[in-house]
Image (spheres, rainbow, N blue to C red):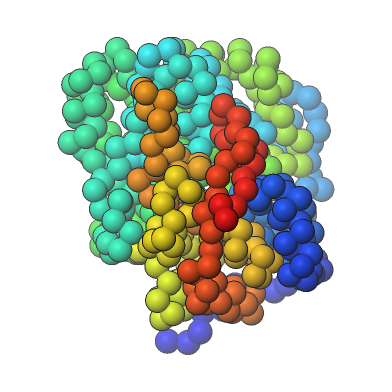
Amino acid sequence: MRTIIEPFRIKMTEPIKLISREEREKALEKAQYNVFFLDAEDCCIDLLTDSGTGAMSTEQWAAMMLGDESYAGSKSWKKFETTVQEITGIKHVLPTHQGRAAEHILAQTRLKEGDVIPNNSHFDTTRANIEYVGAQALDLLCSEGFDTTSEFPFKGNMDLQKLHDCIEINGVDKIPFCMMTVTNNTGGGQPVSMENIRAVKALLDRYGIPLVIDACRFAENAYFIHENEPEYRDKTLLEIAQEMFAYADAATMSCKKDGLANIGGFLICNDDKWAEDFRNEFILREGFPTYGGLAGRDLEVIAVGLMEALDYDYQVYRHATVTYLGNKLQKIGIPFVKPIGGHAVFLDARAFLPHIPPLQYPGIGLVNTIYVDGGIRCVELGSVMFGRTDEQGNEVPAPLELVRLAFPRRVYTQSHFDYIIEVLEEVWRTRGKIPGYRITYQPKFLRHFSCRFEPIE
Protein backbone atom coordinates (compact mmCIF):
# COMPACT_ATOMS: atom_id res chain seq x y z
CA MET A 1 0.00 0.00 0.00
CA ARG A 2 1.28 3.46 -0.84
CA THR A 3 1.87 6.13 1.80
CA ILE A 4 -1.31 7.86 2.92
CA ILE A 5 -0.83 11.56 2.21
CA GLU A 6 -2.61 14.63 3.54
CA PRO A 7 -5.68 15.16 1.32
CA PHE A 8 -4.98 18.89 1.02
CA ARG A 9 -2.35 21.45 0.02
CA ILE A 10 -1.05 23.99 2.53
CA LYS A 11 -2.07 27.48 1.41
CA MET A 12 -1.14 29.58 4.41
CA THR A 13 1.45 29.12 7.17
CA GLU A 14 1.98 30.37 10.71
CA PRO A 15 5.51 30.61 12.13
CA ILE A 16 6.41 28.66 15.26
CA LYS A 17 9.51 28.90 17.40
CA LEU A 18 11.33 26.65 19.83
CA ILE A 19 12.56 28.59 22.83
CA SER A 20 15.53 27.27 24.79
CA ARG A 21 15.25 24.67 27.54
CA GLU A 22 16.19 27.30 30.14
CA GLU A 23 13.41 29.58 28.86
CA ARG A 24 10.93 26.70 29.00
CA GLU A 25 11.90 25.91 32.59
CA LYS A 26 11.33 29.55 33.56
CA ALA A 27 8.01 29.67 31.67
CA LEU A 28 6.75 26.54 33.43
CA GLU A 29 7.81 27.84 36.84
CA LYS A 30 6.03 31.14 36.11
CA ALA A 31 2.92 29.13 35.15
CA GLN A 32 3.15 27.39 38.54
CA TYR A 33 3.57 24.07 36.76
CA ASN A 34 0.15 24.17 35.09
CA VAL A 35 0.53 24.15 31.30
CA PHE A 36 -2.83 25.92 30.88
CA PHE A 37 -1.03 29.07 32.06
CA LEU A 38 1.76 28.87 29.48
CA ASP A 39 1.78 31.40 26.65
CA ALA A 40 0.93 29.63 23.40
CA GLU A 41 3.88 31.29 21.67
CA ASP A 42 6.16 29.44 24.10
CA CYS A 43 4.80 26.07 22.89
CA CYS A 44 6.56 24.82 19.78
CA ILE A 45 3.95 22.12 19.16
CA ASP A 46 0.64 22.57 20.94
CA LEU A 47 -1.23 19.32 21.60
CA LEU A 48 -3.19 20.65 24.59
CA THR A 49 -6.49 20.10 22.78
CA ASP A 50 -8.05 19.46 19.40
CA SER A 51 -10.91 21.82 20.33
CA GLY A 52 -11.04 24.89 18.13
CA THR A 53 -7.36 24.60 17.18
CA GLY A 54 -7.68 23.17 13.68
CA ALA A 55 -7.05 24.74 10.28
CA MET A 56 -10.01 25.78 8.16
CA SER A 57 -10.44 24.84 4.52
CA THR A 58 -10.66 27.25 1.60
CA GLU A 59 -14.39 26.49 1.45
CA GLN A 60 -14.76 27.53 5.08
CA TRP A 61 -12.80 30.74 4.58
CA ALA A 62 -14.93 31.54 1.55
CA ALA A 63 -18.09 30.80 3.54
CA MET A 64 -17.11 33.45 6.10
CA MET A 65 -17.65 36.09 3.44
CA LEU A 66 -21.27 34.96 3.12
CA GLY A 67 -22.02 35.59 6.79
CA ASP A 68 -25.40 37.22 7.31
CA GLU A 69 -25.15 39.15 10.58
CA SER A 70 -28.88 39.83 10.96
CA TYR A 71 -29.92 39.58 14.61
CA ALA A 72 -32.77 37.16 13.98
CA GLY A 73 -33.52 34.63 11.24
CA SER A 74 -30.39 35.19 9.15
CA LYS A 75 -29.60 33.23 6.00
CA SER A 76 -26.53 31.86 7.75
CA TRP A 77 -28.71 30.48 10.52
CA LYS A 78 -30.95 28.72 7.98
CA LYS A 79 -27.92 27.13 6.34
CA PHE A 80 -26.64 25.99 9.75
CA GLU A 81 -30.03 24.58 10.74
CA THR A 82 -30.47 22.75 7.43
CA THR A 83 -27.03 21.13 7.68
CA VAL A 84 -27.48 20.01 11.29
CA GLN A 85 -30.91 18.59 10.49
CA GLU A 86 -29.58 16.75 7.43
CA ILE A 87 -26.96 15.02 9.57
CA THR A 88 -29.03 14.41 12.69
CA GLY A 89 -32.68 14.37 11.61
CA ILE A 90 -33.50 16.15 14.88
CA LYS A 91 -36.30 18.73 14.88
CA HIS A 92 -35.18 21.67 17.02
CA VAL A 93 -31.72 23.19 16.45
CA LEU A 94 -30.19 25.82 18.73
CA PRO A 95 -26.65 27.15 18.10
CA THR A 96 -24.37 27.91 21.06
CA HIS A 97 -21.04 29.68 21.37
CA GLN A 98 -19.43 26.34 22.31
CA GLY A 99 -20.26 22.91 23.69
CA ARG A 100 -20.24 23.69 27.40
CA ALA A 101 -22.94 26.32 26.85
CA ALA A 102 -25.18 23.59 25.43
CA GLU A 103 -24.36 21.39 28.43
CA HIS A 104 -25.13 24.25 30.81
CA ILE A 105 -28.54 24.95 29.32
CA LEU A 106 -29.39 21.24 29.23
CA ALA A 107 -28.45 20.88 32.91
CA GLN A 108 -30.17 24.07 34.04
CA THR A 109 -33.47 23.23 32.39
CA ARG A 110 -33.72 19.46 32.84
CA LEU A 111 -31.93 18.62 36.09
CA LYS A 112 -32.55 19.13 39.79
CA GLU A 113 -30.60 18.30 42.90
CA GLY A 114 -30.41 14.56 43.52
CA ASP A 115 -30.86 13.51 39.89
CA VAL A 116 -28.56 10.88 38.40
CA ILE A 117 -27.17 11.06 34.86
CA PRO A 118 -25.53 7.88 33.51
CA ASN A 119 -23.05 8.05 30.63
CA ASN A 120 -20.34 5.85 29.20
CA SER A 121 -17.92 8.51 30.51
CA HIS A 122 -18.62 12.16 31.23
CA PHE A 123 -15.91 14.54 30.10
CA ASP A 124 -14.86 17.41 32.35
CA THR A 125 -17.32 20.20 31.50
CA THR A 126 -20.24 17.80 31.13
CA ARG A 127 -19.62 16.43 34.61
CA ALA A 128 -19.13 19.91 36.06
CA ASN A 129 -22.39 21.25 34.64
CA ILE A 130 -24.28 18.25 36.03
CA GLU A 131 -22.67 18.47 39.45
CA TYR A 132 -23.14 22.25 39.57
CA VAL A 133 -26.92 21.78 39.92
CA GLY A 134 -26.47 19.09 42.58
CA ALA A 135 -27.00 16.07 40.32
CA GLN A 136 -24.72 13.03 40.12
CA ALA A 137 -22.73 12.15 36.98
CA LEU A 138 -22.20 8.38 36.73
CA ASP A 139 -19.68 6.69 34.41
CA LEU A 140 -20.86 3.25 33.26
CA LEU A 141 -18.06 2.36 30.87
CA CYS A 142 -17.60 -1.23 29.70
CA SER A 143 -14.89 -3.24 31.48
CA GLU A 144 -12.60 -3.23 28.42
CA GLY A 145 -12.46 0.57 28.65
CA PHE A 146 -10.41 0.38 31.86
CA ASP A 147 -7.74 -1.89 30.35
CA THR A 148 -5.28 0.31 28.49
CA THR A 149 -3.76 -2.72 26.74
CA SER A 150 -7.01 -4.26 25.44
CA GLU A 151 -7.43 -4.16 21.66
CA PHE A 152 -11.24 -4.32 21.84
CA PRO A 153 -12.34 -1.97 19.02
CA PHE A 154 -15.22 -0.31 20.88
CA LYS A 155 -13.87 0.51 24.32
CA GLY A 156 -16.21 3.50 24.54
CA ASN A 157 -19.25 1.21 24.86
CA MET A 158 -21.58 1.56 27.81
CA ASP A 159 -21.98 -1.44 30.14
CA LEU A 160 -25.63 -2.44 29.65
CA GLN A 161 -25.83 -4.36 32.92
CA LYS A 162 -24.51 -1.36 34.85
CA LEU A 163 -27.07 0.85 33.10
CA HIS A 164 -29.89 -1.55 33.95
CA ASP A 165 -28.77 -1.69 37.58
CA CYS A 166 -28.45 2.09 37.73
CA ILE A 167 -32.05 2.52 36.61
CA GLU A 168 -33.38 -0.14 38.97
CA ILE A 169 -31.48 1.24 41.97
CA ASN A 170 -32.19 4.94 41.42
CA GLY A 171 -35.59 4.75 39.76
CA VAL A 172 -36.84 6.38 36.58
CA ASP A 173 -37.88 9.58 38.37
CA LYS A 174 -34.25 10.25 39.32
CA ILE A 175 -32.94 9.84 35.76
CA PRO A 176 -34.33 12.59 33.49
CA PHE A 177 -32.06 11.43 30.66
CA CYS A 178 -29.05 9.23 29.89
CA MET A 179 -26.01 10.44 27.95
CA MET A 180 -23.64 8.76 25.50
CA THR A 181 -20.32 10.40 24.57
CA VAL A 182 -18.98 9.69 21.06
CA THR A 183 -16.11 9.16 20.95
CA ASN A 184 -15.24 8.59 24.62
CA ASN A 185 -12.59 11.26 25.22
CA THR A 186 -12.14 10.43 28.91
CA GLY A 187 -11.09 6.86 28.16
CA GLY A 188 -8.71 7.45 25.28
CA GLY A 189 -10.82 8.70 22.37
CA GLN A 190 -12.42 5.28 22.09
CA PRO A 191 -15.50 4.77 19.89
CA VAL A 192 -18.97 3.44 20.63
CA SER A 193 -20.39 0.75 18.36
CA MET A 194 -23.72 1.17 16.60
CA GLU A 195 -24.75 -2.10 18.23
CA ASN A 196 -24.15 -0.58 21.66
CA ILE A 197 -25.94 2.68 20.85
CA ARG A 198 -28.91 0.67 19.60
CA ALA A 199 -28.95 -1.57 22.68
CA VAL A 200 -28.68 1.39 25.08
CA LYS A 201 -31.60 3.09 23.33
CA ALA A 202 -33.70 -0.09 23.50
CA LEU A 203 -33.03 -0.43 27.23
CA LEU A 204 -33.85 3.22 27.89
CA ASP A 205 -37.07 2.96 25.87
CA ARG A 206 -38.29 0.22 28.23
CA TYR A 207 -38.21 2.81 31.00
CA GLY A 208 -39.16 5.90 28.98
CA ILE A 209 -35.78 7.59 29.56
CA PRO A 210 -34.50 9.89 26.77
CA LEU A 211 -31.03 9.44 25.26
CA VAL A 212 -28.81 12.52 24.82
CA ILE A 213 -25.68 12.12 22.68
CA ASP A 214 -22.57 14.19 23.37
CA ALA A 215 -21.64 14.44 19.70
CA CYS A 216 -18.31 16.33 19.74
CA ARG A 217 -16.54 13.68 17.65
CA PHE A 218 -19.50 12.07 15.91
CA ALA A 219 -17.73 11.89 12.53
CA GLU A 220 -14.71 10.09 14.00
CA ASN A 221 -17.11 7.67 15.70
CA ALA A 222 -18.88 7.09 12.38
CA TYR A 223 -15.50 6.28 10.81
CA PHE A 224 -14.73 3.66 13.47
CA ILE A 225 -18.14 2.08 12.93
CA HIS A 226 -17.47 1.99 9.18
CA GLU A 227 -14.12 0.29 9.72
CA ASN A 228 -15.03 -2.15 12.51
CA GLU A 229 -18.69 -3.15 12.09
CA PRO A 230 -18.91 -5.17 8.85
CA GLU A 231 -22.56 -4.35 8.14
CA TYR A 232 -21.60 -0.67 7.74
CA ARG A 233 -18.73 -1.08 5.27
CA ASP A 234 -20.95 -0.08 2.36
CA LYS A 235 -22.48 2.92 4.15
CA THR A 236 -21.22 6.48 3.83
CA LEU A 237 -20.11 8.26 6.98
CA LEU A 238 -23.12 10.56 6.60
CA GLU A 239 -25.48 7.58 6.52
CA ILE A 240 -23.80 6.12 9.60
CA ALA A 241 -24.05 9.44 11.44
CA GLN A 242 -27.72 9.70 10.52
CA GLU A 243 -28.40 6.30 12.06
CA MET A 244 -26.45 7.21 15.21
CA PHE A 245 -28.57 10.31 15.72
CA ALA A 246 -31.77 8.42 14.90
CA TYR A 247 -31.40 6.73 18.29
CA ALA A 248 -31.04 10.08 20.11
CA ASP A 249 -33.78 12.24 21.58
CA ALA A 250 -31.38 15.16 21.94
CA ALA A 251 -27.70 16.01 21.52
CA THR A 252 -25.08 18.51 22.59
CA MET A 253 -22.04 19.30 20.51
CA SER A 254 -18.92 21.39 20.51
CA CYS A 255 -18.40 22.25 16.85
CA LYS A 256 -14.79 23.07 17.72
CA LYS A 257 -14.07 19.37 17.19
CA ASP A 258 -15.90 17.65 14.32
CA GLY A 259 -17.40 20.92 13.16
CA LEU A 260 -13.83 21.82 12.11
CA ALA A 261 -14.43 25.34 13.43
CA ASN A 262 -12.64 27.58 15.90
CA ILE A 263 -15.79 28.32 17.90
CA GLY A 264 -19.40 27.18 18.19
CA GLY A 265 -21.68 24.35 19.18
CA PHE A 266 -25.31 23.34 19.31
CA LEU A 267 -28.09 21.91 21.44
CA ILE A 268 -30.74 19.92 19.57
CA CYS A 269 -33.84 17.97 20.58
CA ASN A 270 -37.08 16.48 19.27
CA ASP A 271 -39.31 17.30 22.25
CA ASP A 272 -41.27 20.55 21.85
CA LYS A 273 -41.40 21.25 25.60
CA TRP A 274 -37.65 20.72 25.97
CA ALA A 275 -37.09 23.11 23.05
CA GLU A 276 -39.32 25.77 24.62
CA ASP A 277 -37.42 25.55 27.91
CA PHE A 278 -34.10 25.67 26.07
CA ARG A 279 -35.10 28.79 24.12
CA ASN A 280 -36.19 30.63 27.25
CA GLU A 281 -32.82 29.94 28.86
CA PHE A 282 -31.03 30.73 25.59
CA ILE A 283 -32.33 34.27 25.41
CA LEU A 284 -31.04 34.89 28.92
CA ARG A 285 -27.63 33.23 28.45
CA GLU A 286 -26.67 32.97 24.77
CA GLY A 287 -28.74 35.51 22.87
CA PHE A 288 -31.54 35.06 20.35
CA PRO A 289 -31.99 31.36 19.47
CA THR A 290 -31.08 31.83 15.80
CA TYR A 291 -27.55 33.01 16.53
CA GLY A 292 -26.76 31.62 19.98
CA GLY A 293 -23.74 33.77 20.73
CA LEU A 294 -22.21 33.25 17.27
CA ALA A 295 -21.62 35.59 14.36
CA GLY A 296 -23.28 34.67 11.09
CA ARG A 297 -19.87 33.96 9.58
CA ASP A 298 -19.25 31.31 12.27
CA LEU A 299 -22.56 29.63 11.46
CA GLU A 300 -21.46 29.49 7.81
CA VAL A 301 -18.08 27.98 8.73
CA ILE A 302 -19.65 25.29 10.91
CA ALA A 303 -22.19 24.34 8.24
CA VAL A 304 -19.32 23.63 5.85
CA GLY A 305 -17.11 21.99 8.47
CA LEU A 306 -19.71 19.48 9.66
CA MET A 307 -19.90 18.05 6.17
CA GLU A 308 -16.13 18.15 5.61
CA ALA A 309 -15.65 16.08 8.77
CA LEU A 310 -17.76 13.34 7.17
CA ASP A 311 -15.49 13.11 4.13
CA TYR A 312 -14.06 9.58 4.14
CA ASP A 313 -10.65 10.53 2.71
CA TYR A 314 -10.24 13.16 5.42
CA GLN A 315 -10.99 10.61 8.15
CA VAL A 316 -8.57 8.09 6.62
CA TYR A 317 -5.82 10.72 6.73
CA ARG A 318 -6.67 11.79 10.29
CA HIS A 319 -6.59 8.27 11.63
CA ALA A 320 -3.42 7.43 9.69
CA THR A 321 -1.76 10.38 11.42
CA VAL A 322 -2.73 9.18 14.89
CA THR A 323 -1.76 5.61 14.02
CA TYR A 324 1.65 6.73 12.70
CA LEU A 325 2.56 8.18 16.08
CA GLY A 326 1.13 5.22 17.99
CA ASN A 327 3.06 2.67 15.94
CA LYS A 328 6.33 4.51 16.50
CA LEU A 329 5.71 4.68 20.26
CA GLN A 330 4.90 0.97 20.27
CA LYS A 331 8.33 0.18 18.80
CA ILE A 332 10.03 2.28 21.49
CA GLY A 333 8.04 0.54 24.22
CA ILE A 334 6.16 3.59 25.48
CA PRO A 335 2.83 2.57 27.09
CA PHE A 336 -0.34 4.13 25.68
CA VAL A 337 -4.03 3.36 25.38
CA LYS A 338 -4.79 0.72 22.76
CA PRO A 339 -6.30 0.63 20.24
CA ILE A 340 -5.30 4.10 19.11
CA GLY A 341 -8.17 6.58 19.39
CA GLY A 342 -9.51 8.98 16.84
CA HIS A 343 -8.18 12.39 17.85
CA ALA A 344 -5.21 11.76 20.12
CA VAL A 345 -2.67 9.36 21.52
CA PHE A 346 -3.19 8.82 25.25
CA LEU A 347 -0.04 7.91 27.15
CA ASP A 348 -0.51 5.61 30.15
CA ALA A 349 1.15 7.76 32.82
CA ARG A 350 0.68 5.12 35.51
CA ALA A 351 2.68 2.57 33.51
CA PHE A 352 5.10 5.23 32.25
CA LEU A 353 5.94 6.44 35.79
CA PRO A 354 5.24 3.57 38.20
CA HIS A 355 7.42 5.22 40.87
CA ILE A 356 4.93 8.10 41.26
CA PRO A 357 1.77 7.29 43.30
CA PRO A 358 -1.58 8.45 41.86
CA LEU A 359 -2.05 11.29 44.36
CA GLN A 360 1.33 12.70 43.41
CA TYR A 361 -0.16 13.05 39.92
CA PRO A 362 2.09 11.16 37.50
CA GLY A 363 0.25 12.74 34.58
CA ILE A 364 1.32 16.21 35.68
CA GLY A 365 4.91 15.04 36.02
CA LEU A 366 4.83 13.61 32.51
CA VAL A 367 3.11 16.64 30.95
CA ASN A 368 5.60 19.06 32.49
CA THR A 369 8.62 16.98 31.49
CA ILE A 370 7.43 16.70 27.88
CA TYR A 371 7.14 20.49 27.79
CA VAL A 372 10.55 21.17 29.32
CA ASP A 373 12.31 18.58 27.16
CA GLY A 374 10.72 19.51 23.84
CA GLY A 375 8.41 22.53 24.04
CA ILE A 376 5.40 20.28 23.41
CA ARG A 377 2.25 21.08 25.37
CA CYS A 378 -0.17 18.26 26.17
CA VAL A 379 -2.67 17.64 29.00
CA GLU A 380 -3.28 15.35 31.99
CA LEU A 381 -6.44 13.22 32.03
CA GLY A 382 -6.02 11.51 35.37
CA SER A 383 -6.54 12.20 39.04
CA VAL A 384 -6.23 15.98 38.69
CA MET A 385 -8.96 16.17 36.05
CA PHE A 386 -11.13 13.22 37.12
CA GLY A 387 -10.27 12.48 40.74
CA ARG A 388 -13.04 12.85 43.31
CA THR A 389 -13.53 13.27 47.04
CA ASP A 390 -15.28 10.58 49.10
CA GLU A 391 -17.78 11.13 51.93
CA GLN A 392 -14.94 11.41 54.45
CA GLY A 393 -13.27 14.15 52.42
CA ASN A 394 -10.44 11.95 51.17
CA GLU A 395 -9.24 12.30 47.60
CA VAL A 396 -9.93 9.23 45.47
CA PRO A 397 -7.69 8.73 42.40
CA ALA A 398 -9.15 8.39 38.92
CA PRO A 399 -9.33 4.87 37.45
CA LEU A 400 -6.87 5.84 34.71
CA GLU A 401 -3.84 8.13 34.72
CA LEU A 402 -3.51 9.36 31.15
CA VAL A 403 -1.69 12.10 29.26
CA ARG A 404 -3.42 13.18 26.06
CA LEU A 405 -1.58 14.36 22.99
CA ALA A 406 -4.51 15.81 21.04
CA PHE A 407 -3.94 16.59 17.38
CA PRO A 408 -5.37 19.80 15.91
CA ARG A 409 -7.07 19.02 12.62
CA ARG A 410 -5.13 19.69 9.40
CA VAL A 411 -2.33 21.54 11.24
CA TYR A 412 0.83 19.46 11.71
CA THR A 413 2.83 17.44 9.16
CA GLN A 414 4.76 14.18 9.46
CA SER A 415 7.99 15.98 10.37
CA HIS A 416 6.24 17.53 13.35
CA PHE A 417 5.22 14.05 14.47
CA ASP A 418 8.75 12.75 13.98
CA TYR A 419 9.94 15.51 16.31
CA ILE A 420 7.27 14.55 18.88
CA ILE A 421 8.49 10.94 18.72
CA GLU A 422 12.10 12.01 19.34
CA VAL A 423 11.08 14.06 22.38
CA LEU A 424 8.94 11.27 23.84
CA GLU A 425 11.75 8.76 23.36
CA GLU A 426 14.10 11.00 25.34
CA VAL A 427 11.49 11.47 28.10
CA TRP A 428 11.01 7.69 28.22
CA ARG A 429 14.76 7.13 28.51
CA THR A 430 15.05 9.48 31.52
CA ARG A 431 11.66 8.73 33.08
CA GLY A 432 13.11 7.65 36.43
CA LYS A 433 14.11 11.25 37.17
CA ILE A 434 10.60 12.68 36.77
CA PRO A 435 9.15 13.92 40.10
CA GLY A 436 5.63 13.82 41.46
CA TYR A 437 3.69 17.00 42.20
CA ARG A 438 1.48 18.42 44.93
CA ILE A 439 -1.38 20.89 44.51
CA THR A 440 -0.84 24.29 46.13
CA TYR A 441 -4.16 25.84 45.03
CA GLN A 442 -7.37 24.49 43.52
CA PRO A 443 -10.87 25.85 42.78
CA LYS A 444 -14.11 23.99 43.55
CA PHE A 445 -15.00 23.06 39.96
CA LEU A 446 -12.85 22.04 36.98
CA ARG A 447 -9.70 22.36 39.02
CA HIS A 448 -7.35 21.24 36.26
CA PHE A 449 -7.84 24.49 34.37
CA SER A 450 -6.61 26.77 37.14
CA CYS A 451 -4.96 24.83 39.97
CA ARG A 452 -1.30 25.37 40.84
CA PHE A 453 1.40 22.80 41.55
CA GLU A 454 4.89 22.42 42.91
CA PRO A 455 7.28 19.50 42.35
CA ILE A 456 7.94 17.09 45.21
CA GLU A 457 11.68 17.02 45.71
Rendered position, 181 above or below 237: above
Q: Position of residue 158 (x, y in %)?
A: 28, 41
Q: Nearer the viewer, residue 265 or 127?
A: 127
The answer to whether any part of residue 160 appears in the image is yes
- Residue at 76% x, 56% y is 27
> Residue at left 45%, top 16%?
134
Front position in the image: 440 or 352 = 440
> Exactly how many numbered labels are in the figure?
0
Residue 401 x, y percent position in the rendering = 42, 52
Residue 410 in which image quadrant = bottom right
Please state the horizontal and vertical placement of residue 325, each as a whole percent of the image. 50, 73
* Rendered image quadrant of residue 249: top left
455 relative to 163 in the view: left or right: right
Q: Position of residue 181 (x, y in %)?
A: 41, 41
Residue occupying the far bottom of the picture:
2
Q: Is residue 157 left or right of residue 412?
A: left
- Quadrant where the image shows the N terminus: bottom left
Indicate left or right for 57 with 158 as reference. right
Q: Is residue 211 visible?
A: no
Determine the residue located farthest toward the front in the rendered image. 457
Residue 50's quadrant in the figure?
bottom right
Q: Is residue 303 left or right of residue 184?
A: right
Which residue is at a point 52% across and 26% down the rendered structure image? 129
| Up-down relation of residue 402 to residue 73 (above or below) | below
102 over 263 or under it: above or below? above
| Residue at the image position 62 percent from the left and 77 percent from the top | 419
Camera-side residue: 185 or 246? 185
- For the C terminus, the image quarter is bottom right
Residue 228's place in the image compared with 1, above or below, is above
